[in-house]
Image: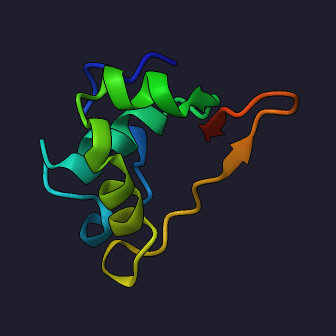
Amino acid sequence: MDNLHKPLTEVFKTTALEVIPVQNSNAYKLLKALADGKPHQRNNLALSTDLGETMRSALQQLRSKSYGYWLIHSVKIEGTKKHCCN
């Protein structure tokens, strides 16, 4: 599913509105990028969302109580020093 042009309320139809970040916030950009359910390399994700170093902050926000503890896996890619999120 290509979620690039869909608002997150369309992608997550059964999700409470309170846990969807404000549109165009860093947390929103990150969640929207991850909404396809596929693994993303951390470096590519940081570049494609224009979050760069602030991606850590967006991840922390999504995993916090205020956004409903979104479950986002950070996984080390075996045999490399790279990480991915999904």
Residue 4 against residue 70 in the figure, above or below: above
Residue at point 14%, 49% (across, down): 25
Nearest the eye: 85 or 53: 53
Residue at point 44%, 16% (across, down): 2
Nearest the eye: 62 or 79: 79
Q: List x then y, in percent, for residue 68.
A: 42, 75
* Residue farthest right in this picture: 79
Residue 28 against residue 2 in the figure, above or below: below
Residue at point 34%, 71% (across, down): 67
| Quadrant placement of the C terminus | top right
Q: List x then y, in percent, for residue 77.
A: 77, 33
Quadrant assignment, res 10? top left
Lateral position of residue 85 relative to residue 10, left or right: right
Residue 24 against residue 41 in the figure, above or below: below
Q: How is the image coloured?
A: rainbow
Q: List x then y, in percent, for residue 5.
A: 25, 19
Lateral position of residue 61 relative to residue 34, left or right: left
* Residue farthest front in this picture: 81
Quadrant assignment, res 7? top left
Nearest the eye: 72 or 19: 72
The mark tally for this picture is 0
Residue at point 40%, 38% (across, down): 11
Q: List x then y, in percent, for residue 56.
A: 38, 55
